[in-house]
Each structure stands twice: as structure tokens, then as C-alpha cells.
Image (tube, rainbow, N blue to C red):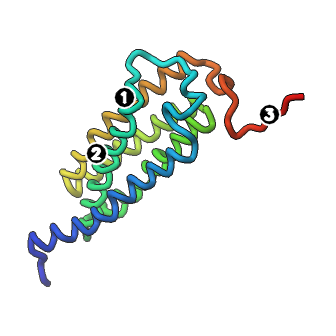
């Protein structure tokens, strides 16, 4: 049995990271293009927002940083060949990532504020379980998930406040995909 050197392990991790980081960023970007998000969304611009709502430029910066951290965490787990919970960790990561990618079209496209809030709760639970399982494989990978968990708490509180301030959010402005005819 031949053991890999630290240098070989580092290069293997970097090869994974070169794939996972851009892939996660690309998936996040694609999700935000399904429906216009943030300040580019007419419906969202009309919503009453809580005082803790940050300026629009904060979101793309925060999400890019978070997606980089998520990609690095995933690369660490993918690089941990032979680890006991590796398959479970990858499956959990994929499940929470799917939930993450569905949230933007659900909130900004379908205007389903309450469902989006429920999805953030599911996303947080999946991300928390993922973080715990990551920690059993690579502690550093779990620590890379912590800012994401914190952001999900913040995003969930924003989503909840918007839901509370806009009880009829779904009907506030017609969706850009709906056909309207004037006679």
C-alpha cells in the first residue's frame, strides 16, 4: 500500500477545487438568471422591505463569497477518498444545493414568499446536517460551511420579514411571464 505525500494530497484537493468552485458559482449564477433577482426584479422593487435589508449590491458579493466557500468545502470532501461518510456527505451537499438553487426562482420568479421561507428552513436543516457530516470527515470543510449557515439565518429572517410586511406579495405586481391582454 502506497501513501500519498502531503504535496500530492494538496494537488489532488486543488484539482477538485478547480472544478467545484467554478461549478458552484456557475450554478448559483444560473439560478439567479431563471428569474430577475434583486434590484432587477420589478416585483421585488415594489415590496415593503424590513430595515435590516441590505443594499442590493451586498447580495451578489455575499453569494459569490459563500459559493466559493461551499465549493472549497465540497472539494475537501471529494478529495477525502475512503472516508467513512463521504457518500452521505456528498448526497447531503447536493440536496441542500438543489434547495438553494430552487429558492431564487421560487421567490423572485414565482413570488411564493411563504414557500420560499419554508424552503430556507429546509435548506438550513440540510446545510446543518451536511456541516455535521462534513465535520466527521474534514473539520476544515465543516468550518467553511459556517458562514453559509449564518447567511441562511439572515436570509431566512429577511424572507420572513418580507412575508410579514407583504401578505399579498404574490399579487403585488403581475409576473413578467404572465400574459395580460387589454381590451
The alpha-carbon separation of the residues under discs 2 and 1 comes to 15 Å
Q: Which label sits on residue 145?
A: 2
The image quadrant where one finds the N terminus is bottom left
Q: Is residue 149 left or right of residue 106?
A: left
Image location (x, y in percent) of residue 130: 34, 49
The alpha-carbon separation of the residues under discs 3 and 2 comes to 44 Å
- Judged from the image, the secondary structure of the residue bearing numbered disc 2 is helix
Q: Is residue 93 visible?
A: no
Q: Is residue 21 above or below residue 28?
A: below
Q: Which label sits on residue 128?
A: none
Q: Are marks 2 and 1 in contact (CB under 8 Å)?
A: no
Q: Which comes sooner in the sequence, label 3 or label 2? A: 2
The image quadrant where one finds the C terminus is top right
Q: Is residue 142 above or below residue 36?
A: below
Residue ID for mark 3: 180
Q: Which label sits on residue 154?
A: 1
Q: Residue furthest bottom?
A: 1
Image location (x, y in percent) of residue 49: 48, 19
Amino acid at each position: 500500500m502506497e501513501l500519498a505525500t502531503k504535496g500530492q494530497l494538496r494537488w489532488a484537493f486543488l484539482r477538485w477545487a478547480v472544478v467545484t468552485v467554478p461549478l458552484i458559482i456557475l450554478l448559483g449564477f444560473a439560478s439567479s438568471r431563471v428569474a430577475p433577482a434583486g434590484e432587477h426584479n420589478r416585483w421585488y422593487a415594489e415590496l415593503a422591505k424590513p430595515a435590516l435589508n441590505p443594499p442590493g449590491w451586498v447580495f451578489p458579493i455575499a453569494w459569490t463569497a459563500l459559493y466559493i466557500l461551499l465549493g472549497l468545502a465540497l472539494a475537501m470532501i471529494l478529495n477525502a477518498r475512503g472516508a467513512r461518510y463521504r457518500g452521505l456527505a456528498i448526497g447531503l451537499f447536493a440536496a441542500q444545493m438543489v434547495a438553494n438553487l430552487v429558492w431564487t426562482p421560487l421567490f423572485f420568479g414565482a413570488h411564493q414568499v411563504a414557500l420560499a421561507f419554508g424552503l430556507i428552513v429546509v435548506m438550513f436543516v440540510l446545510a446543518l446536517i451536511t456541516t455535521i457530516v462534513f465535520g466527521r470527515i474534514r473539520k476544515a470543510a465543516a468550518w467553511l460551511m459556517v458562514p453559509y449557515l449564518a447567511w441562511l439565518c439572515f436570509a431566512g429572517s429577511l424572507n420572513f420579514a418580507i412575508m410579514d410586511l407583504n401578505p399579498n406579495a404574490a399579487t403585488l405586481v403581475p409576473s413578467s411571464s404572465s400574459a395580460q391582454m387589454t381590451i
